[in-house]
Image (tube, helix red, strand yellow):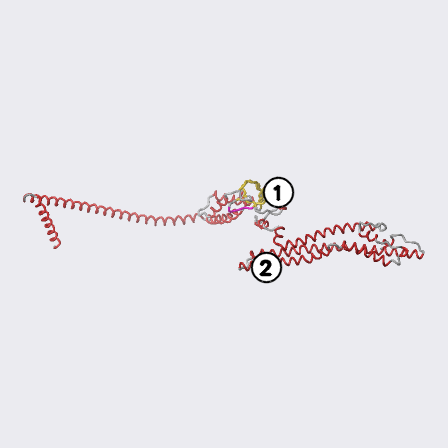
Amino acid sequence: MFGRFGLVMLIGLSTLIGVSTSAHAAGSLEELLEETRNARARQAQANAGREQEFVTRRDQQAGLLAEAQRERDAAAAHSQDLSHQFDANEIKLTELGELRNSRLGSLGELFGVVRQASADASGVVFDSMISAQYPGREEFFAQLSKTTSLPSISELEQLWFEMQREMTETGRVARFRTNIVTEDGSPKPASVVRIGAFTALTDGGRYLTYLPGVRTLSVLSRQPSSTLRELARGVVQATGGYVEAAVDPSRGILLSLFVQRPNVMERIEKGEAVGYVIILVGTIGALCALYQFIYLVRARAAVSRQLKHTDRPSNDNPLGRVLATFKGDSATIEEDAEVVELRISEAVLREVPVLERFQAFLRLAVAAGPLLGLIGTVVGMIVTFQSITESGSSDPKLMANGIGQAMIATVLGLGIAVPLLFVNAGLSSLSRSIVQVLDEQSAGLLAESLERARARELGGGDFPRGEGSRRV
């Protein structure tokens, strides 16, 4: 009530203010009265327009509200329909699934077997070098092993075909052209000979290995020995029939390990300085032994020829030089026997050093070889312990270098000692046999001379020259 009264007072006040304002502008009371009526009319008209605008907006808001309520009701009805449809679909899917399982029967087991066989074959095909000749098989097996639907007849036929082809190609020797990775890492088209799924060869007798990651064949960075490469060249150049070949049953694993084995020079390099010293000693000993062996063989042959002609000594052999030193007088041979014996012994002793030449050095090399090898062993063990100390662990890979150095030095030391031991024994036997012949012939010659001198003194005639040596 108070609010409405206040509003009336405000309106009257504003009217009076307007009247007072117009009073200054109007010239008379009539004009002022007319102006007041016009102002009230304009105000009433403006109020009516605003009221009409408010009503119009109210009606619009009411229409929007009604439209929103209708949309909400329609959405709620549609949601309810979808819910009913979802429940009906769930029931239908359950019924269809049961019907599918009942009609599937043994095909369900087939599905599992196909997936399992595909998974197993996928691993074999992925690592098989046959895939270099027949690419694209890996994707088929990988996709079939992960499928969630029953495989089709064509997929089953392809699965059987690929598995059968893998088994068939494993027993065949095939020649085909493909891109291979050369030693420098660049691809190059080449002719390849594949022996089953085990070994692959290319021009020049080079062995290949299969790289599953890039699905291509690559030349081994290090080729095997010349013997195996010669076999490979025979296989590559063959046009038919049967040829000898080296086959790796582990599909390249053994070949990769075999080519990593160090050769003789690499093993020697592992022995380092001690190994080179051992080899130097062994080489000098071998050269000396070879030279002396040739000399003794020739000397023995010359002595054998001299034995047939003891009456004609020659200076080209030890026996001839010993026989030539006998210059005693046959009339006084008994008086000069001791002198002659000493002279002959001197001649024999003069020949012995030449016949036993280098044997002392060979005995020294036989004894020094194992000792030098022991030095190398100790150095290798020091390297091993040092690697353990630096790494703080006993990893075999870290110790392999030092242990290899130790073993190589030991093998080198024994490797020169054992052969030189047998060689020295053989040279000693040859030299002793020649010295034995010299001793026998010199003693026989002295005895023959003494017998002839005694026979002349007794008047019993003379023995034929050379009979004493033949009797010896």
The stretch drawn in magenta includes residue 210: yes
Circle 1 residues within 10 Å: few <14, some 14–19, many ≥20: some
Residue at the spot 14% in from the left edge and 44% down from the top edge:
46
Closest to the camera, between mark 1 and mark 2, is 2
**Spatial separation of the CA atoms under disc 1 and disc 2:** 45 Å
Identify the mark at residue 323; answer none if there is no mark: none
Q: Name the residue beneath numbered marker 1.
A: 233
Q: Quadrant of the C terminus?
A: bottom right
Q: Name the residue beneath numbered marker 2.
A: 382
Using the rendered image of the protein, determine whether residue 108 is visible from the camera's viewpoint: yes
Q: Look at label 2 and name its amino acid.
A: Ile
Q: Earlier in the sequence, mark 1 or mark 2?
A: 1
Residue at the spot 91% in from the left edge and 54% down from the top edge:
462
Which structural element holds mark 1? Answer: helix
- Give the percent coordinates (x, y) of residue 30: 5, 43
* 207 shown above or below 343: above
Magenta stretch in the rendered image: 209-213
Front one among 60 and 105: 60
Residue at the spot 85% in from the left edge and 58% down from the top edge:
339
- Image side of residue 142 versus residue 399, left or right: left
Front one among 436 and 87: 436
- Mark 1 and 2 residues: CB-CB less than 8 Å, in contact? no
The stretch drawn in magenta includes residue 399: no
